[in-house]
Amino acid sequence: MIRATLLSLTLALTAPLPAAAQGVPDQTSAKRMLFATRNAQLLIVRQPFLSEADLATLREMPKVAQLKYYGAMAANPAEGLQSESTRGAFNFHSVEEARAAALRACGPGCVVVAEVRPRGYQDGRPLTLSQDASRTVAGRDFGRAGTNAALAISPSTGAWALGDGAQAAVAACAAKGAGDCKTAVGR
């Protein structure tokens, strides 16, 4: 009897915790926290070196490219907007992560010149995901990942993946070359 009780207790303690117990929102809660996925808006970060022509170029970007939130563009003031060092980082999980990625790619001395955010963006949401990951959480693909569906994200690369369970999602995310994957949404 004692062995059976100990075995039951051991199994209960080693069983994976549900998402809510891990502090990870479930799909229903995550949908309420995330921004709508239909539209993104470009916010120009005015810098002294940007000419009127540069500002006009930035304003035209949404018309010529599908910009996914969260995104950022960085340029080197010494080289100008129209240089080879200008870089963008798009479809990240927060505007801060997109800024950091764009600045890393651009190099020393660069500054952010534009950000891509969801329409109606407000600071302070408890969960933010890239436009594609948000669309997946809001849609049917999340449920198709399995009975223990989970979504893992990489803050530094913007990668994300679904899996049947947190471990599977993290492994699928890591397989995309990301070393900092963590579970963001679960069941």
Image (tube, rainbow, N blue to C red):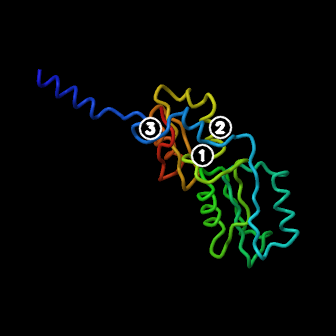
Label 2 element class: helix
> What amino acid type is highlighted by mark number 1?
Leu
Of the image marks 3 and 2, the number of the one nearer the N terminus: 2
Specify whether 155 is left or right of 107. left
Res. 49 image quadrant: bottom right
Count neighbours of disc 2 (C-alpha within 10 A) and say few if under 14, some if 14 to 19, many if 20 or more. Answer: some
**How far is mark 1 from mark 2, CA to CA?**
9 Å
Of the image marks 1 and 3, the number of the one nearer the N terminus: 1
Question: Which of 184/160 is in front?
Answer: 184
Mark 1 vs mark 3: give the one in front. Answer: 1
**How far is mark 1 from mark 3, CA to CA?**
17 Å
Label 1 element class: loop
Location of residue 104 in the rendering, given as x and y in whole percent from the top left corner? 60, 66
Location of residue 24 in the rendering, given as x and y in whole percent from the top left corner? 46, 41
Vertical position of residue 8 compared to residue 131: above or below? above
Residue located farthest toward the bottom when viewing the structure as drawn:
78
Q: In the rendered image, which residue does mark 2 sit on?
A: 135
Vertical position of residue 49 compared to residue 95: above or below? below
Q: In the rendered image, which residue does mark 3 sit on?
A: 166
Vertical position of residue 47 compared to residue 59: above or below? below
* Mark 1 and mark 3 residues within 8 Å of each other at the beta carbon: no
Mark seen at residue 129: 1
Specify whether 55 is left or right of 169. right
> What amino acid type is highlighted by mark number 3?
Ala
Specify whether 8 is left or right of 88. left
Q: Residue at x 54, y 40 (%)?
A: 161
